[in-house]
Amino acid sequence: GQQLNQSPQSMFIQEGEDVSMNCTSSSIFNTWLWYKQDPGEGPVLLIALYKAGELTSNGRLTAQFGITRKDSFLNISASIPSDVGIYFCAGQLGGSNYKLTFGKGTLLTVNP
Amino acid sequence: GAVVSQHPSWVICKSGTSVKIECRSLDFQATTMFWYRQFPKQSLMLMATSNEGSKATYEQGVEKDKFLINHASLTLSTLTVTSAHPEDSSFYICSARQSTNEKLFFGSGTQLSVL
């Protein structure tokens, strides 16, 4: 089946720094999604990308859908302590297939 | 925004007992719901796809007789872990697909601990 490789696994940064994480896939997805999960909670959608090459922002977050449709990245600018959490990418084939395939997650720690 | 309520948020049970977890879409209809399990520090793994009024579709390696899924209405799906064992201890998360715009929304998860 399809697999998503997400990197890095973890990051330790200082408040105010920018962060970048990415996902690559062995095959094509038609939708890429980025989620944040806090401990003991379900994932919360940050950004959804629906077209190859699409670049979308949500506040300090920016994500892009790779033109090959096999990759995506998420950038967080000017990080703050509440950005701490696990970030997951997810791919969706779309059409009548709504299943999500998740990356393994990036654990972000922000030091104030 | 759309809200998915998952209940209970945590449950402790004895080995051999059955546990039911509910997933409700509070303000929208969901023809499709998904059930995931997540082990500590790992990703979400899809267990099954639940379609309203029909049998669930299970992912490879997931025992359908152990993880019973019922999706009797457009706003409720339930996952029953039957004859639970310690290895079933995990974080279970549901998501619901909003019928009108196909967006997916997640519940807040259920931490199951089997003693």
Image: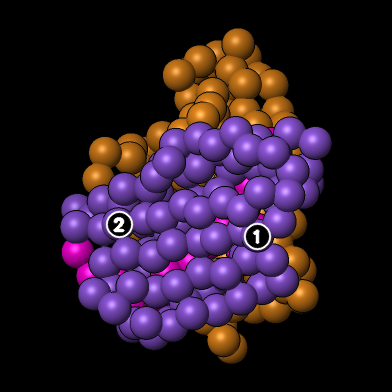
Please, which residue is most extreme toward the bottom here? B100
Q: Position of residue B79 (x, y in %)?
A: 55, 46
Q: Quadrant of the N terminus of chain B?
A: bottom right
What secondary structure is found at the residue carrying circle 2? strand
From what the image shows, is residue B78 above or below residue A51?
Answer: above
Mark 1 — on which chain does it sit? A
From what the image shows, is residue A103 above or below residue A64?
Answer: above
The chain drawn in purple is A
- Residue A24: numbered disc: 2
Mark 2 — on which chain does it sit? A
Residue type marked 2: Thr
Taking depth in this image into account, of A80 and A71 the one nearest to the observer is: A80
Taking depth in this image into account, of B34 and A9 the one nearest to the observer is: A9
Residue type marked 1: Ser
Could you tell whether B15 is left or right of B8 in the image? left
What secondary structure is found at the residue carrying circle 1? loop
Residue under the image location 19 percent in, 53 percent down: A1
Q: Colour of chain B?
A: orange
Contact flag, marks 1 and 2 (Cβ < 8 Å): no
Which residue is disc 1 drawn over? A77
Taking depth in this image into account, of B19 and B110 the one nearest to the observer is: B110
Q: Position of residue A29 (x, y in %)?
A: 30, 71
Q: In the rendered structure, does residue A92 fall within the stretch colored magenta?
A: no
